[in-house]
Image (spheres, rainbow, N blue to C red):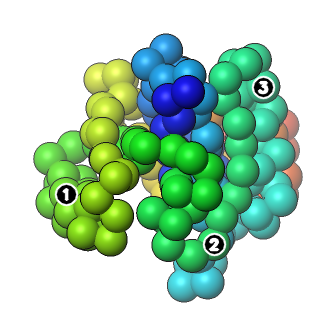
Amino acid sequence: MRTAIYPGSFDPITNGHLDVVQRAAKLFDRVVVAIATNDLKNPLFTLSERKTLALQALGHLTNVEVDSFNGLLVNYVEAQKGGVIIRGLRAVSDFEFEFQLALMNRKLNERVETIFMMPKETYTFLSSRIVKEIARLGGDVSSFVPRHVQQALSEKFNLSDPAIPA
């Protein structure tokens, strides 16, 4: 069974993330969306909330699982019997950082490969950080995230009905 791990903070999961996961699910027998716990970041959503939002968005994909991890990614990949790390690249600016991570992961465990996947052109500008900022300022994020994520953002920022743009 070919298992791929798609790691990230997913704070929150966006349509760009979903696009990458859906395409990865066609290429691999099993895809694990691995939500990272990172003490250096201050996420808007708790780990439990991020997992729930991801599960709601991906529940229809039978070969996709949602999990969380702490520690070295390559150790997690090994524990999951995975052989591939999937990383999303939105723009050239992402490449240098992601390339360095891929090389370091290869140095730490040469059995783990990294595959870079680009989201659809429609989502190349999209990031969780930008989505949170737009939502915080009362903007309409309905074309960037699933409806349940839009609702969760609205609740976090104490906004009125997210279906009605501010």
Amino acid at the residue labelled 3: Gly
Q: Position of residue 142 (x, y in %)?
A: 63, 29
Q: Which mark is residue 134?
A: none
Q: Which residue is mark 1?
A: 99
Q: Disc 2 to disc 3, how far (Cα)?
A: 23 Å
Q: Position of residue 133 (x, y in %)?
A: 54, 58
The secondary element bearing badge 3 is classed as: loop
Report the residue at 28% width, 39% height from top.
116
In which quadrant is the N terminus drawn? top right
In which quadrant is the C terminus drawn? top right
Instruction: Please say if 55 is above or below 8.
Output: above
Q: Which residue is mark 2?
A: 70
Query: Relative to the observer, which residue lies in front, 71 or 121?
Result: 71
Disc 2 or 3, which lies upstream in sequence?
Answer: 3
Residue 43: image quadrant is bottom right
Report the residue at 32% width, 33% height from top.
117
Instruction: Please say if 145 is above or below 160.
Output: above
Q: Which mark is residue 59?
A: 3
Q: Is residue 119 visible?
A: yes
The secondary element bearing badge 2 is classed as: loop
Amino acid at the residue labelled 1: Phe
Q: Is residue 154 visible?
A: no
Instruction: Please say if 126 is above or below 133.
Output: above
Report the residue at 82% width, 55% height from top.
49
Q: Decide: few, some or many residues near mark 3? Use Cα within 10 Å; few <14, some 14-19, many ≥20.
A: few
Q: Decide: few, some or many residues near mark 2? Use Cα within 10 Å; few <14, some 14-19, many ≥20.
A: few
Q: Position of residue 90 (x, y in %)?
A: 29, 41
The secondary element bearing badge 1 is classed as: helix
Amino acid at the residue labelled 2: Asn
Disc 1 or 3, which lies upstream in sequence?
Answer: 3
